[in-house]
Image (cartoon, rainbow, N blue to C red):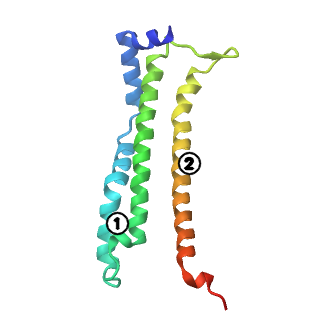
Amino acid sequence: VWIRRLFCGSKESYMRGWTEMRKAFEWEDVGMIAFLIYASVPISRFLYDVLVRRWRKDKPFEDSKASKIASLCSQIGRIASFVYLLELATEFLDGLVNHHLSITRAGIDITETFFSAVPGFVATVIYASWAARKISVWKRKAITDYMSDEKNFSIG
């Protein structure tokens, strides 16, 4: 029943959802996310070429720590873009179902807290999973490097 009400809402409810989404939209957020995704690697490459390559001509940008940090920033930006789109979608749904759907649990209306908590919860899960995966990869690389070095296993 509530799904039918959700997708068969009136024009006013869609406009209310659109208005709520536009209230949540910030150009500064979009600019920062776009900067992280698209500009962190090129700017880091430029700064590396200008500042570091004078002294370290033997190490290309792709092998540098600056490249790794820029790649991490770009990945963080990609995750942030997904979370931001989810936040906008939940704002739209919050406005859309504001007067059509009431989720109650133990007599308490949880619609308001549900829609405001979803983006934060999803962001926490995604960022924590991403960080755990990165740490796992770094740990595996460190163990592999240690195990492949013969001096760590020489006797005497």
Q: Residue furthest right?
A: 106
Amino acid on which disc 2 is placed: Ala
Amino acid on which disc 1 is placed: Ser
Residue at image position (39%, 62%) is: 70
Can you say whether 30 is above or below 106 in the image? below
**Structural crowding at the residue carrying mark 1, measured as other residues with C-alpha within 10 Å and reported as few (<14), some (14–19) or many (≥20):** some
| Horizontal side, residue 21 vs residue 46: left or right | right
| Residue that badge 2 annotates | 128
Numbered badge on residue 44: 1
Quarter holding the C terminus? bottom right
Q: Residue 67: percent from the left, percent from the top?
A: 38, 66
| Horizontal side, residue 29 vs residue 151: left or right | left
Q: Residue 121: percent from the left, percent from the top?
A: 56, 37
- CA–CA distance in space, label 2 to label 1: 25 Å
Can you say whether 80 is above or below 49 in the image? above
Can you say whether 26 is above or below 15 in the image? below
Q: Foreground mark, 2 or 1?
A: 2
Residue 30: quarter of image: top left
Numbered badge on residue 121: none
